[in-house]
Amino acid sequence: SLLGLSDEAIAQKAKRDLDIMVPAFKSASVIDYAVVKLPEAVNWYFPGSLASCPTTESESFENAYFAGDVVRGLKHASWSQEKAYVSGLVAANAVLGRDKLKGVTPLLPDEPHVALGRDAVAAARRALSFGGDGPSLARPPW
């Protein structure tokens, strides 16, 4: 866990890891850094924020990969700690040149009562919106 490390130790580890991922960074020096530790923190997403999240493979650096619950495009319906774990496996597989989902257990279909509840809520939302997506905190009616 990074939470037990000092800010300086985290910055040094990040620099070492970057030097491995992007060899051109070996000649660079860290001149400033900030470490924010948020135990028990939660990401708060907002409508449209998914487009700003990174994919597993960096779009800017050939040898950089991302893992965490903010990674998009995993085709695995998991969130938070589970998504961070799955994205770590996907990133490791990308580094090793393996099938992206190697070692990832597909999610089982919802249990009947969960699927029925979701369908009922979706139907109620459609009815309340006269056929649209239904009411949403992301799209208040005012």
Image (cartoon, grey):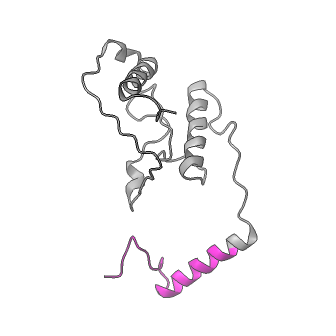
In this rendered view, identify the residue nearer to me: 3 or 122.
Answer: 3
In this rendered view, identify the residue nearer to me: 34 or 66.
Answer: 34
Residue 40 drawn at (x, y percent)? 47, 49
Residue 81 drawn at (x, y percent)? 56, 47
Q: Is residue 108 above or below residue 58?
A: below
In this rendered view, identify the residue nearer to me: 66 or 14.
Answer: 14
Farthest-out residue, top: 27
In this rendered view, identify the residue nearer to me: 21 or 84.
Answer: 84
> Which image quarter holds the C terminus?
bottom left
Q: Quadrant of residue 124?
A: bottom right
Residue 131 drawn at (x, y percent)? 50, 84
Q: Quadrant of residue 119?
A: bottom right
Farthest-out residue, left: 31
Which residue occupies 59% across, 41% down? 85
Determine if the magenta segment contains residue 126: yes
Residue segment shown in magenta: 116-142
Which residue occupies 59% across, 49% down? 75
Residue 86 drawn at (x, y percent)? 60, 42
Q: Is residue 82 left or right of residue 134?
A: right
Q: Is residue 37 left or right of residue 121?
A: left
Q: Is residue 44 above or below residue 67?
A: below
Q: Is residue 46 above or below residue 61?
A: below
Q: Is residue 91 above or below residue 116?
A: above
Determine if the magenta segment contains residue 137: yes
Q: Is residue 116 left or right of residue 40?
A: right
Q: How many marks?
A: 0
Which residue occupies 73% across, 56% down? 108
